[in-house]
Image (cartoon, grey):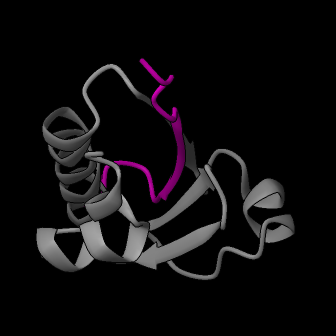
Amino acid sequence: MPRRLQYRFRLYVADDAQNSTRAIANLNGICRQHLPERHSIEIVDVFREPKRALADGILMTPTLVKLSPGPVRRIVGTLSQVEPVIMALGLDRAQA
């Protein structure tokens, strides 16, 4: 049986702002449903690490970056529209 791809995400948030909290919950739900045991999520608080966010080109929060597998993709927002998020991240092909 072929090894299934591991997905790595980085989510940039602004402390405990409502939109950031919502994005974390939505990303966790998407990963639990579509990538169980095949994902890792790193949360970066832009208030605690402003230089890192700036160096990474993050201008708005929440911003999700899919790091791997490539290509790298970014989505800005709360991730509440599940189907477009799945398509944008290429997760519709992850089920195979």
- In the rendered view, would you say 52 is above or below 28? below
- Residue 43 seen in the figure: yes
- Magenta stretch contains residue 61: no
Quarter-of-image position of residue 84: bottom left
Asked whether 1 or 87 is in front, the reply is: 1
Percent coordinates x, y for residue 8 in the rendering? 55, 40
At a point 18% along the width and 45% down the height, the residue shown is 25
Q: Would you say 72 lies left or right of 74 here? A: right
At a point 52% along the width and 46% down the height, the residue shown is 9
At a point 34% along the width and 50% down the height, the residue shown is 94
Q: Quadrant of the C terminus?
A: top left
Percent coordinates x, y for residue 81 in the rendering? 12, 76
Q: Which residues are magenta?
A: 1-17
Q: Would you say 89 lies left or right of 49 here? A: left
Percent coordinates x, y for residue 56 in the rendering? 79, 66
Percent coordinates x, y for residue 73 in the rendering? 57, 71
